[in-house]
Amino acid sequence: MNSAERLLGEAALARFGERTALYCGNESVRYAALAERVRRAASALAGYGVGRGDRVMILMRDSPALAETWLGCLWCGAVAIALNDKLSEDDYRFIRADCDARLVIVEDRLRSMLAAFGDELASAGKLVLVDSDAGAVPAWNAAMLASEPMGPALATRPEEAAFWLYSSGTTGRPKGMVHAHKDIDAVGEVFRAVVGLKPGDKVLATSRLFFSYGLEHALLGPLALGASAVLNPDWSDVRTVVRVIAEHQPVAVFSVPTVYRRLIALGGETLGPLRSVSFFFSAGERLPESTVSEWRRLVDREILSIYGTSETLCVVMVTPAGTSFGTHTGLPLRGVEVRLLAADGSEVPQGEPGVAWIKHPSLTTGYVNRAELSEEQFRDGWFCSKDVFVRDAEGYYRHQGRADDLIKVAGQWVRPDELEEAVLGEPAVAEAACVPFVDSEGFERLALFVVARSSAEGAVESARAVCEARLPKHKRPKWIRAVDELPRTLTGKVQRFKLRALLERELGAES
């Protein structure tokens, strides 16, 4: 099997060929045209000497060009690796060495992101720019136009590598994960189980295609079902999100809690176009109850929680429609198994917290060049997520945070998100994040960071007052600090290690 052929081969084109596959700005691309471009990309890759199993790094904004290049890799049996366009030069160097890429294809306007590393790639004949007319650097678009479309897709094995994903780097170096051609068979289950997506329906995701959440819901899932994906090549501010929704009226929108909170800040009148959307989904971090209730008040729609990982590629669990109150994460999707285990490996009883071990049809086999970590987290077809959940009497899973974030204060377990939830409803507080921190006496305590809506001092005092009024003493933060913004990965997750480092520098300077 070849997953690109599954999506854009003769059988798929017989059903969807004349429908629109992609919308991007003023451009729309039919399935038949996308299939031809993918085959041209495959042929162009072969012209650069790329063959079966060769890794190809792709640094482009979300666009039809990225989609056809990425799928072209799969069509010819190569391995696609879409890159985050906000990484450092050092990170790009690391990923190149980690995956041993045969070729690096870069959109011209992103060339500066590679800095001196780009010159080294060009000298080694490894760099291709999309539109370059410089004789020393080949031009990808010119190679595409000069290439005849490749014939049938390479017949790959189901377990053969199709693409790699790199983690978003919340704690350090990105981790590479290999996904096979068979894994694409599992994409789009949320569309089937919850949305009831039909051919021709439009879908919008604010997360980028280098991230598994965006890849599944803004490209692979829609293509698998004959729907239309709405792409935005530039990083979206919330007013752009509103404008694109008003223009395309997608049936489903996939985003993250940070974007929903920023949309809420625009006010109800501005959010009017969003009422045309049937389904809103949120992933990447826990969805606060306050955000769910305020969204329901302003937009008259639910936000349904999604939980998934780069390791699984596809969604693990989702909140069923009609049950979203911000209090649970959801139920496992078809074909997914979840076990909650204690530290000794035993299954925890209902209502008790345990670390989620997941069996999923699209699970990666492990981390690239990380044998020890792979052995720790992958066993007998199961993956240790390191996320803690509680399962209630109705079978719903409730996310409790990361296993390494839960701490004991005064002999009692505390979840940092309890503090965040307590203060997020305060008018003075726009965002909040709580992190464990070891004090000067060696005891673990809590530090709360808040982003103010207006006055930083007012946000800190408001947070302090609500914590004293609503939380028992052992759950109250020892430190409360205001920051201009929370450091986040490009997938929306708070980089808590950076907040710890901020406090560490402050306290170190005082001593």
Image: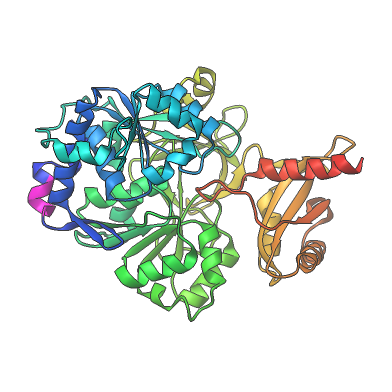
For the point 78% across and 55% down, the residue is: 481
67 relative to 98, above or below: below
Question: Which of the pair 457/124 is nearer the observer?
Answer: 124
- In this rendering, position of residue 148 left or right of residue 444: left
Is the N terminus in the top left, top right, bottom left or bottom right quadrant?
top left
Residue 212: x %, y % from top left: 40, 43
Rendered residue at 30%/43% (across/down): 131
Choose between 113 and 346: the one closer to the eye. 113
Q: Quadrant of the C terminus?
A: top right
Residue 279 in the image, given as x and y percentages of width and height? 37, 65
Q: Main secondary structure of the magenta part?
A: helix
Query: Would you say residue 258 is visible in this rendering?
Result: yes
Decide which of 230, 268 is in the foreground and name it: 230
Q: In front: 57, or 442?
A: 57
Left or right, 425 with reference to 390: right
Which residue occupies 39% across, 76% down?
Answer: 273
**Which of the 4 image quarters holds residue 21?**
bottom left
Write down the quadrant of residue 403 in the picture.
top right
| Colour mapping | rainbow
State which region is magenta. Answer: 12-17
How far across and how far down the image is residue 29, in percent? 20, 55
Apparent side of residue 458 relative to residue 429 in the rendered image (left or right): right
